[in-house]
Image: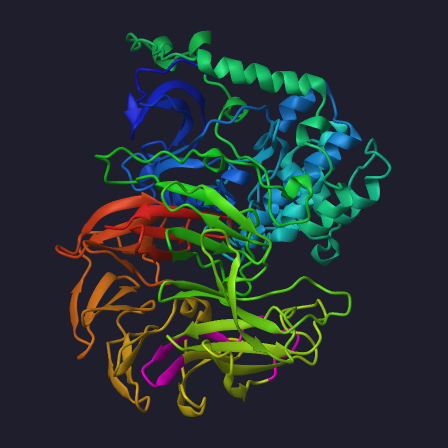
Amino acid sequence: MPTPLTHDDPVALGPYRLIARLGSGGMGTVYVARSAGGRTVALKTMHAAIATDPAARTRFRLEVDAARVIGEQFGARVMDADPLAETPWLATEYVLGPPLDEAVEAGGPLSEQSVRALGAALCSALGQLHRSDVVHRDLKPSNILLTAYGPKVIDFGIARAIGDDRLTRAGAAVGTPAFMSPEQATGQEHDAAGDVFALAGVLVYASTGRGPFGHGQTADLLYRVRYAEADLSGVPPTLVPVLAQCLAKEQAVRPTMAQLARQLHDGKGEFAEHLPPELLADIGRRATDVWRLVPQRLPAPTAGPEAAAGTTEVGRRPSRRGFLALGGALAVAAAAGGGAWWWRERTPARDRGGTTPKGSAHKTQNIEPMWTYTFGTVLQADLGAVVPRAVGGMIVVPTGGGTQGVNPTSGVRKWDSYFEENSWQTLVADGRLYRLSIGEETDDGIGPAVTLQTVNPDNGKTIKNLARFAGTNDELPTHQLLCVTNRVAYVVVGKGKYDGGGTFSAGETSALEAADIETGRILWSKPLPVRFELSTSLHFLAANAVGSRLVTLQEVKDETVHVVVRNASTGAVLWERPYGIDDPDILRSGITADSDHVYLGGSRLWALRLSDGAVVWKTSTAHAYGPPVLRSGILYAVGDGAGLTAVDARSGKVLWTERGGEVGEASTAWPPVLGDRYAYYKNGTLLRAISLANHSTALTYQTSGKQFYVDSYAKLVLGVDSQNLTAYPLR
């Protein structure tokens, strides 16, 4: 239970007033806190002595990042955070529900029905982490909160990116021994399969009240995890083979989270229907108790060791479990389609006409987004994330599993469309919304021909069919709408049977074609290299029609990019040159060019002559740069270790670099977004607004976004990750 504050506790952190202590451990203290508007949060801090350790600060920042990655559907919404403060802190929504271990201790093991529902929902939550290349590494009953809407995974203190061992000593076992994977127990790489192993251990506990490898000293537990068979006695017989496969010592034998979810549950019914009445009653009681908390503070201790020790019962600090029982956590709902309840989208307040609250008008740091819109589908990143299309007072969001229209003022969804086009099959040009029609899947894998259409952004309905590409198959996912001028559309279309396998199908052929959007006539067609079925890259990363030339960034094969410039009237290649870049995906942001030059980022900024591809200038190799953007003869790009940088587009001379800010975490994975007063880019966990007048940080915003786009009409910066669309003011 919460306990009163002590004389050592601060009165407030950030905009939150502290109400009570929830727990204190080796790393820091967790409080119940409230905002001026009355919102109750769980606020986690670091001890002052630990905050001086750079590695500890990095862990804290990564914990904030992981909490944002799992998102408000799968986890506790991060309300606010300042990992750079003198006392770093993290505020999350206050979630009501007991930890799984307390629920089992109080009411006994769960029924098979409850365990199956719990497991399937946890597969959804962990699957979201894994799709973002993050593993939890410390999944255990006390890190899972149970609510009426689904389980919530918490505590990302040792979560990290898959393959990133910078904060783990070689050979060191990090985690909780009773629920570690064998590879984790030996200090080896713990990947997504390790989380599957840990999840199975959690489900054994939920079924029996004990872990699969018993209790005991750490060394004994680690030995049993590595070499002993899991004890599945007491597990319902139909669950035994499912969990036994998950607990296999060999990682390759274990199922994926998606496979495990299908084995556990069919997704019918609401999650609460699968919980015992006693547990639902406990959840309801906690919802009442939280509002009874009022600020209390113990007096300063008098002289003497007994007083200083604070040993009275009222001052006893609860265990971290006490915090988990009442504090900050994560909501489960959905990922991708299928209609199953553990994948279903929960309707947030904004979809009922509300919006996520703004930060206070005077706040300049860690400002909340204006609103956050959660997609009905968790987006896959293999072919590129969603690109919001701002047009006609609407933000159109094509997800590949349906398209949605979002009000830019409120973040409220206005309409849904069952058209299944992806972002690379839609675009906006000259105030019109275009798409390539994608039909429903057929039994024989051969659909009708691809059609180019204009779309009404107010409702997602087709206005007019502009061109039909005869002989193509609209079931193939690799068609691309590259760019549209006032008369011509440039499109990649495919032929062949869709085999339902990977990105490309066996025998599929593709062509780059130009179509007259007034007459529908195909002006020219150029064959493209054949891709193997295992290829995961589309033919083009970006394209732009500049005068009489079509400028493209073409992935001629996986991870190999060429700048290819064609005659826009005939399709003939005018020149082509390799573009060596470590991460081709960042080039999806578009092509920056003017009538004379093409401008590129990479190991340096450079300009190519548009007429023949000759190098006009290059910056030094002191910094690597992300893709640039151009305005009034000045290029703006984010430099690794430099932050926002302005360069003269004609000469390549660096005009200025960002000053006075932390630039060690400046993201070069996307170009900056330009407003009239500020340029916006991601730095660490924040979206920074850099003044174009004095070149220093003016504002910072909380963000989980990975790519950022501009809505010039609504004056918004739009951030996108695999689950959410967030809005920030464009100034």
For residue 11, side relative to residue 225 (left or right): left
- Locate residue 509, reporting x and y percent: 63, 82
Q: Which is nearer the eye, 567 or 257?
A: 567
Q: Can you give x and y, in whole percent of width and height, for residue 153 in the image?
A: 57, 36
Give the quarter of the image for residue 355.
Answer: top left
Instruction: Please tell me whether residue 82 is drawn above or below residue 167 in the rendered image.
Output: above
- Name the residue at 30% across, 15% down: 7
Give the mark count. 0
Residues drawn in magenta: 530-551
State which quadrant residue 504 falls in: bottom right
Q: Position of residue 291 (x, y in %)?
A: 45, 14
* Furthest residue toward right: 237
**Residue at the spot 70% in from the left edge and 55% down from the top edge:** 251
Q: Is residue 392 visible?
A: yes
* Position of residue 679 in the picture relative to residue 316 (left or right): left
- Nearer to the camera, 638 or 448: 448
The answer to whether 616 is drawn above or below residue 156 in the figure is: below
Is residue 7 rendered magenta in the image? no
**Residue at image point 36% right, 21% down:** 38
